[in-house]
Image (cartoon, rainbow, N blue to C red):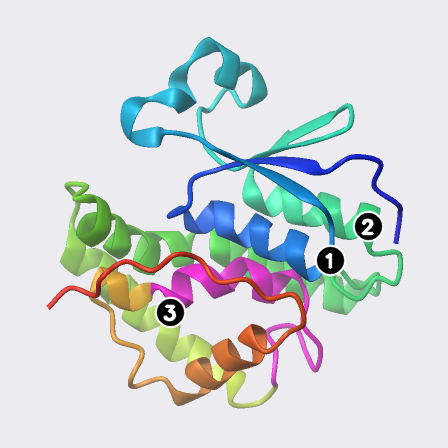
Amino acid sequence: MTPVANPIRLYRHPLSGHSHRVELFLSLLGLPVERVDVDLRNGAQRTPEFLRKNPFGQVPVIEDGDVTLADSNAILVYLALRYDPSGRWLPRDAVTAAHVQRWLSVAAERLFAGPGRARLAKVFGVALDHEQAKGIAVQLFTLLDKHLATQPFLAGDAPTIADVAIYTYTAHAPEGGVSLDPYGHVRAWLARVEDLPGFVPMQRTPVPA
């Protein structure tokens, strides 16, 4: 592992699934981290200081020495390439790397459009089509359950950043009113991720009735 002179500074919100996937991966890699909570409710992400770090005004952002980087999936790739020379978390062979990228794309689109947005509606009271988000989540989890019936992790036999990217919004889907009860293979996969050395959970919020 490439040594870290100073802790990596992580700008996050404790209830942000995007932030948690970065926090989780930092912990799985055993990297020192300094957490800086961004007060999203009061607009701290829109201040000039924060917008210099990420013009889109979103968490997470990391500062690693002279590197400032936003976007959770981009950060996962950066950390894997810089701090995991073994290539375990982002395999270098073309086929497995492509499978990982496929799941990063799912994390950026269908995962957030479904369970991510359903959780936004229930936890944060965001006005959006909750039933549509639930429908996308059910479709995604049905496909995910079928996929995980054939292998222990998303890109094969070992965990990768694909699993890190998909984990949080899946594990916290019940907070958005999406039950995981029908998806036994998904629940078994969540348990495997949670058993990884260095796993850290995200703060949970009450499941809606």
Residue at the limit of the structure toward the top, as seen here: 48
The mark found on residue 99 in the picture is: none
Residue 110 x, y percent position in the rendering = 40, 57
> CB atoms at circles 3 and 1 under 8 Å apart?
no
Task: From the image, tell me which residue sits under label 1.
Answer: 29
Q: Residues within 10 Å of mark 1 (few under 14, many from 20)?
A: some
Above or below residue 75? Residue 140 is: below
**Residue at disc 1, secondary structure:** loop
Q: Which residues are magenta?
A: 152-172
> CB atoms at circles 1 and 2 under 8 Å apart?
yes
Q: Amino acid at mark 3?
A: Leu
Quadrant of residue 89 within the rendered picture: bottom right
Q: Quadrant of the N terminus?
A: bottom right
Mark closer to the chain start, 3 or 2: 2
Task: From the image, tell me which residue sits under label 3.
Answer: 140
Question: Which residue is at 42% across, 40% downward?
Answer: 13
Residue 154 x, y percent position in the rendering = 59, 74
**Residue at disc 2, secondary structure:** helix
Task: From the image, tell me which residue sits under label 2.
Answer: 83
Tell me how far mark 3 sits from mark 1, CA to CA.
28 Å
